[in-house]
Image: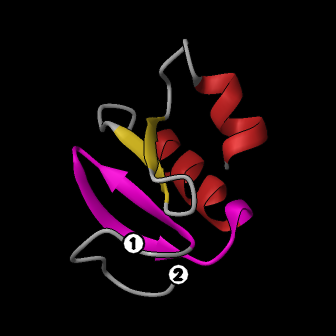
Amino acid sequence: MVAIVRELPVSGYALEIDGRLTTEFATRGGVKTGARELKKRFPMLRVGIYDAQRGRRVRLGDRSQRRHVLTSCC
């Protein structure tokens, strides 16, 4: 983990919790692991991943995009 995110990162990935970007990660593997662990511990949270390079957010657990997020995006 790198730092608390105050604005959209220009590189890397960020963890989104309940609509707020919280923690910035340098690697795709790091953000995926963080998101999975958080969702596992707190299933009621809306957890997502922001990919700065592609400029998009995808929520973890969204069945329509989950496979895409976990395999190619992040």
Give me the residue at 48% from left, 20% from top. 62
Q: Is residue 23 left or right of residue 72?
A: left
Label 2 close to label 1 by CB (< 8 Å): yes
Residue 19 lies, with reference to residue 71, above or below; the image says below
Q: Position of residue 51 (x, y in %)?
A: 53, 56
Q: Position of residue 29 (x, y in %)?
A: 73, 61
Q: Position of residue 69 (x, y in %)?
A: 64, 36
- Residue to which mark 2 is pinned: 1
- What label does residue 58 carry, if any? none
Label 1: few (<14), some (14–19) or many (≥20) C-alpha neighbours in 10 Å: some
Label 2: few (<14), some (14–19) or many (≥20) C-alpha neighbours in 10 Å: few
- Residue to which mark 1 is pinned: 23
Judged from the image, the secondary structure of the residue bearing numbered disc 2 is loop
Furthest-top residue in view? 64
- Callout 2 amino acid: Met
Task: Specify whether residue 23 is painted magenta.
Answer: yes
Q: Quadrant of residue 31?
A: bottom right
44 or 11: nearer the eye? Answer: 11
Per the picture, the main secondary structure of the magenta-coloured stretch is strand
Give me the residue at 53% from left, 75% from top. 11
Residue 55 lies, with reference to residue 13, above or below; the image says above
Judged from the image, the secondary structure of the residue bearing numbered disc 1 is strand
Q: Is residue 32 left or right of residue 45?
A: right
Q: CA distance from mark 2 to mark 1?
A: 7 Å
Give me the residue at 45% from left, 46% from top. 56
Q: Which residues are magenta?
A: 12-29
- Callout 1 amino acid: Thr
Q: Position of residue 45 (x, y in %)?
A: 30, 38
9 or 30: nearer the eye? Answer: 9
Q: Is residue 24 left or right of residue 54?
A: left
